[in-house]
Image: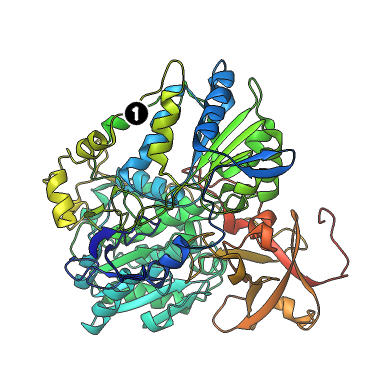
Amino acid sequence: MDIVTACNLNCPDACSLRVSGDPSGTLTIRGNPDHPFTRGFTCGKIRAYPRRLSRPDRIRAPLLVRKGNRVPISWDEALDLCASKIREYRKEPASILHIQGDGAKGVLKSAAALFFGLLGASTTRGALCDSAGIAASIADFGALDMNDVEDLANARGIVNWGKDLSRASVHTAHIVRRAREGGTRVFTVSPGGDGNGPFSDETLLIRPGTDRFLAAAVLRLLLEREAVDPGLTAKCRHFGALRRILEDRSPEDLAGACGVSLRDVERLFTFYREHRPAAALIGWGLQRYRFGSENVRWIDALAFLTGNVGIPGGGSSFNVSSLRNFNLDWAGSFDHGKIRAFLLPEIGREILEAEDPPVRMLWVNGTNVVNQAADASAVARAFERVDFKVVVEAFPTDTAIRADLVLPCALNLEQEDIIGSFLHPYVQYARPAVPPPEGCRDDFSILEELGKRLDPPVALPPREECLRRSLRSPFLDVSLEELRERGFARARRGRVAFEGLRFAHPDGKCRLPEKLHDEPPAPAGYPLSLLSLIRRGAMHSQIPPEEQECPPVVRVGRECAALRELDLDGEIHLVSPKGRMPVRVEVVDGLHPRAVVYRRGDWLLCGGGVNRLVSAVSTDRGEGTAYYSQNVRLENAGAKKSPGTS
């Protein structure tokens, strides 16, 4: 067996894969060498994925809570129960809440939103991940777009604003490495905690969440030295407002706001001046703050006013939509003015406070939301408040164990779909490499069968029709048969975003930020910024329980003030106004003294789950989640507690 398929994990690389198996059933996964982007290699997460498919704790039959115990039931019984509950709550369809995540990507995953939209059920708005940066990009340029990632090879300089190239995308890292071999220089701006050392020629350690002030400080120098091309100011709006903001703030003030020196600001100014074209590579961490969207907007403004937007080798790259190349008219379009939408970054509080009607039924798929959402304890309490909860899941996660009914789902490599990328312009056919275990079904099949049991029924379009219609896009010239045979196709997308400075706003002009908000001071008693960063070896919370450290490890820099009073050999707690949890502390080099790094995704069930300490706060734009605006402290067990801690 040698199958060409694709990875559907929530990863920008969306790799084309070759999967082979031996007579014993052992699978081997490698990157497809014939794919122009995957280039024959892939990450360790997907190479290890066969172990996830065959884990002994995988759920292989629907599980229903009866008298406090979870018992396996048949699929007919499970779907009949779901149908009876929906019939009951359908009298007030807004009392049914559908929560969908991006745990698996693909066009067929849109079927769930269609199904519950046809019911008139409540949905969610906002995001747990990247929506603040997306909103910033659209506000600035009129559309979410960026230069082809391969265009980084044409840059003379790359300014990496916080993207962890050692963990976030193995192919972006490969492209940056090749660009450096060709003479491109890389300047990394970050609070640390990443593995960017081997990918950087210069680094600048910045106070967490203050990237906008560094970008503004460089722009202040640009204006002082009359280095802005007048032709650029004619291609944008709000240049006068931006100038007034910068004239009201001294270079020293702006540098101090982000914790760097004027010499550091000069270094970055010089880099932009001497390495044109310069590409801005924007990490997703800096938009996970209260003013995260503003962080991205000031970086965009710097890229634009230094003449690095709309040209090869330049651009300001955040991401693109993984579904942008598809036609999803079959998935419907629902008016959120008529359908109740709960704010996802504050989902626990939203459910708890819902009235007229309250939430009586939950359907969760594609997300371990109790683990992943901010204020995890409130989300858990919200689940307790809901009468009937259905979770589509493969493992007993923090969310699944709070369900009344768990429906076991097919996983990556076990289901058919068409996959896009939020990084590159290729679309891939995901061919099942192995069948799902007996008793597990894909999301589309579950909803298809459930819809038939309702009265009136809710009918999804046939699966084959959804796949075919998805490819009827002005950006694609490939049939489903061709895609199945070839495995991938390149979408018709330009390699340079906004080429010729033609932007997607109605007037064709770029927009510059009109505000620069000060960073809120740390609350008394909580001096550290909690950075719950990604892991190298796991995707979000897809971590086997036996691989989770208890107590979890946090990392601080050698200059962290907390180390003066902390006994590292004693019991240590990480504390926020939301609560406390035992941790172990490691001291590392290259981390800002105000930062404490926690590698996220471990489970509440296993003693982890850092989001129980994170307040539910939304970002300034995009209704994103401001995870990194959470302030904390470290203290030994038995230390005096501040008011509000528990």
Answer left or right for 627 relative to 299: right
Where, by quadrant of the figure, is residue 86 drawn? top right
- Above-or-below relation of 556 to 6: below
What residue do we see at 64% from left, 38% from top?
Answer: 404
Residue 436 appears anywhere in the view:
yes
Q: Nearer the viewer, residue 130 or 223?
A: 130
Q: Residue at x 36, y 83 (%)?
A: 201
Residue 352 point in image, percent of width and height: 69, 34
Query: Secondary structure beneath disc 1?
Result: loop
Query: In this view of the protein, can residue 493 be seen by the observer?
Result: no
Q: Position of residue 187 (x, y in %)?
A: 37, 76
Question: Badge 1 local density, few (<14 within 10 Å), some, or many (20+)?
Answer: many
The front one of 9 and 184 is 9
Q: Is residue 453 above or below residue 198?
A: above
Q: Which residue is mark 1?
A: 460
Q: Residue furthest front?
A: 23
Q: Image quadrant for the C terminus?
A: bottom right
Percent position of residue 217, x then y: 45, 65
Looking at the image, residue 367 sits to the left or right of residue 490; the answer is: right
**Colour approach in the figure:** rainbow
Disc 1 residue type?
A: Leu
Residue 394 on image: x %, y %: 51, 52
Q: Is residue 312 left or right of residue 250?
A: left
